[in-house]
Each structure stands twice: as C-alpha cells, then as structure tokens.
Amino acid sequence: MKEQRTVNIFIGYDSKEVAAYHVLSQSLIKHSSLPLAITPIALDNVASIFTRERNNLQSTEFSFSRFLAPYLSGYEGWSIFMDCDMIARRDVAELWSLRDENYSVMVCKHDYQPKEDVKFLGQVQTKYEKKNWSSVMLFNNERCKALTPEYVSTRSGLELHQFKWLESDNQIGSLPLKWNHLVGVYDYDPEAALVHYTEGGPYFKDYADCDYSDEWNKLLVETTFVAQK
C-alpha cells in the first residue's frame, strides 16, 4: 500500500448544519495523532462538476455529492467520507489503519430499518437496503473510477447508496460498528469511536438531550472564539 502522509477526509456540508460540520472537524483534529486534510463537500464548491437537482427525498444537501470523494481525490490513494452530523471520540488514525486493498470501499454494515417515517426538520426518513452504510465510507479511490461526476449526477439514489456501481458486494469491506454508532438506534456505548446523530443532532431543539449531546456541546464551545479581557 502506497504511503499517505495525511488522512484525507471529506465531510458532507449542509447549509442547515454548519455548526455540525465545524464541531465534527474539531473532534477529528482534537483526537488525531496524524495530520488531517479535511475537505467539505459543499454544493456551491462542486457546482461546476455536479449538476444534479435536489429532490424531496434528499434529507441533506450532500445526499449524492458524497460519492464525488474518489474523483476529488484524483482516484488516488484512500479517502474517508463522513456525514457532518457526527463527532469523533477516538483517534481517526485507528479507522485509517483498517484500510484493506482487497476492497474498493469499506463501511459499517448496519442491519436495521428506521422505525420512524420523519426525522430532523420534518425530512422524510427513506427506508432501503444498506441504510446508513454510505454515511461513513473508506474509499480505495483507484477502484472507484465508476464514480465520475456524470455518473454521480445522473444515477438513482438507490444505485449510489446501495453500491450498484461496484461489480459485486464482495468488493465492500466491513468496518466495526463503533465507527458509525447510530444515536437513537443503538444503545449508548462508552466505546463508540464515531457517533452519528442520524435522527437529529443536539443542535436541533427536539434532540437537545440525545446520547452524547453533552460531548457535542463541549466541542461546540471549543470551536467558538471567546474574547479575553
């Protein structure tokens, strides 16, 4: 495996969850023992290559643009994509060390279907096979060349999120579930390494007291400049 001197991380950016993006970034930086290259995937920044119009089933602005990560990496090396509604509680170097050249992409293979029909801000909770697998992805970029900007802009949501762009599911490696712990779906776990506020984060009133909300709020304070007298 070719040496990469930095951990290449792409984070989905949503204009309704700006604070979430910065809190996740701070949590990654705070715990990391390796240098990080953190890139937001914001729609305005990829408008020249990503032409897809948003539809009502998209709960975030990065529902589909997340799959541009291999292209944005020049299809070289490895990269990580993660949703913005998360915080890291462990060193992301531990996740980075799990890269396996036998696979094209590696994910946490959740086995569940959401019980609710609506999540944060009244967004429709879509239900499909491999739900939330794509919220944390470890891309082996050279093996993901099918994910061109044209492909990502035109293919169906299920084709993208169910990894139909791969020749088979055998190319999908497994990551420990602690690297995508679904808050409100799984019981509180003190060992969770990356927690995912998938139903709604502490920055929304209805989820202010969810699991790990105290940790999110402490990180928010760390990202905020406080003037000293």
Image (cartoon, rainbow, N blue to C red):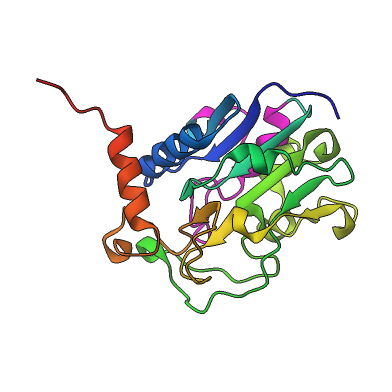
Residue range (magenta) = 45-73
- Count the labels in the image: 0
Up the image or down, 5 lies above or below 84; here it is above
Q: Evaluate whether residue 202 shows in this view.
A: no
Return the x and y of residue 222 as percentages of the image width and height.
Answer: 31, 35
Up the image or down, 50 lies above or below 88; here it is above
Q: Evaluate whether residue 168 shows in this view.
A: yes
Which residue is at the far left? 229
Residue at x-position 46% and y-position 69%: 184
Is 134 colored magenta in this rendering? no
Front residue (pair 208, 29): 29
- Quadrant where the image shows the C terminus: top left
Up the image or down, 88 lies above or below 161; here it is above
Front residue (pair 210, 84): 210
Residue at x-position 75% and y-position 50%: 106
Give the left or right position of residue 217, taking residue 52 as reference.
Answer: left
Return the x and y of residue 97 as percentages of the image width and height.
Answer: 73, 39
Front residue (pair 60, 7): 7
Which residue is at the far bottom? 115
Return the x and y of residue 86 as percentages of the image width and height.
Answer: 48, 50
Return the x and y of residue 75 as percentages of the image width and height.
Answer: 78, 29
Up the image or down, 228 lies above or below 168; here it is above
Give the left or right position of residue 172, taking residue 36 as reference.
Answer: right
